[in-house]
């Protein structure tokens, strides 16, 4: 056998072996997916948040948002123009490792927030970056830990009490 013929056989065998290895690697095995544990809502997420959102066609947009344990949201949005418009928006939210995605009013309003280390939420732009206005101010939502409530006494007088956590309605 000549050297050229031996090289040709060796090179053909190498190509055949490589093809067999590639075809063996691309073969998928159909195995059932493992049971995943249920997604748990971080205990620090439900609560009352307050902040302002960017607004191009108004003077200010102020929001008081309650994230509830059942993954529902209620947001009271006050928009300041020449007049004041107050809207109550309801919907749901989803928590991932670093973000909170809020869908309101039959999915017509979407807000995305970054979870900040302090328990607060930072409003995200459509590009996924934390929003900053022209002056460098962010649109953060502050977590309210103590909610003052007014309690009516039997004699019709009022007493202000501070309730730990989120007020129950």
Image (spheres, rainbow, N blue to C red):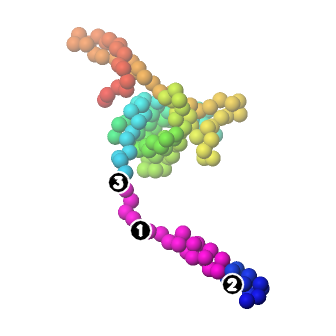
Please state the horizontal and vertical placement of residue 103, each as a whole percent of the image: 46, 46
Q: Is residue 69 magenta?
A: no
Q: Which residue is mark 1?
A: 30
The quadrant in which residue 134 appears is top right
Alpha-carbon neighbours of circle 3 within 10 Å: few (<14), some, or many (≥20)? Answer: few
Disc ID at residue 9: 2
Please state the horizontal and vertical placement of residue 55, each as a whole percent of the image: 60, 38
Looking at the image, residue 144 lies above or below residue 134? above
Looking at the image, residue 47 lies above or below residue 147? below
Q: Earlier in the sequence, mark 2 or mark 1?
A: 2
Local secondary structure at mark 2:
helix
Q: CA distance from mark 1 to mark 3?
A: 15 Å
Q: Is residue 20 magenta?
A: yes
Q: Is residue 84 visible?
A: no
- Residue found 69% across the figure and 80% down from its top: 10
Nearest to viewer (mark 2 / mark 1): 2
Q: Earlier in the sequence, mark 2 or mark 3?
A: 2
Disc ID at residue 62: none
- Residue found 37% across the figure and 16% down from its top: 162
Looking at the image, residue 98 lies above or below residue 166? below
Q: CA distance from mark 2 to mark 3?
A: 50 Å
Local secondary structure at mark 1:
loop
> Over which residues does the magenta segment extend?
13-35
Alpha-carbon neighbours of circle 1 within 10 Å: few (<14), some, or many (≥20)? Answer: few
Disc ID at residue 35: 3
């Amino acid at each position: 056998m000549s050297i050229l013929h031996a090289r040709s056989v060796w090179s053909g065998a190498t190509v055949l072996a490589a093809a067999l290895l590639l075809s063996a690697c691309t073969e998928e095995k159909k195995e059932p997916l493992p049971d995943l544990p249920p997604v748990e809502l971080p205990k620090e997420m439900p609560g009352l948040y307050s902040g302002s959102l960017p607004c191009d066609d108004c003077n200010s947009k102020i929001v008081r948002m309650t994230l509830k344990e059942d993954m529902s949201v209620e947001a009271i949005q006050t928009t300041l123009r020449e007049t004041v418009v107050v809207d109550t928006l309801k919907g749901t939210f989803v928590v991932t490792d670093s973000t909170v995605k809020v869908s309101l009013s039959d999915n017509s309003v979407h807000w995305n927030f970054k979870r900040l280390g302090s328990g607060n939420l930072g409003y995200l732009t459509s590009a996924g970056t934390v929003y900053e206005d022209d002056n460098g101010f962010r649109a953060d939502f502050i977590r309210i830990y103590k909610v003052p409530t007014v309690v009516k006494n039997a004699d019709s007088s009022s007493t202000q009490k501070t309730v730990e956590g989120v007020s129950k309605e």
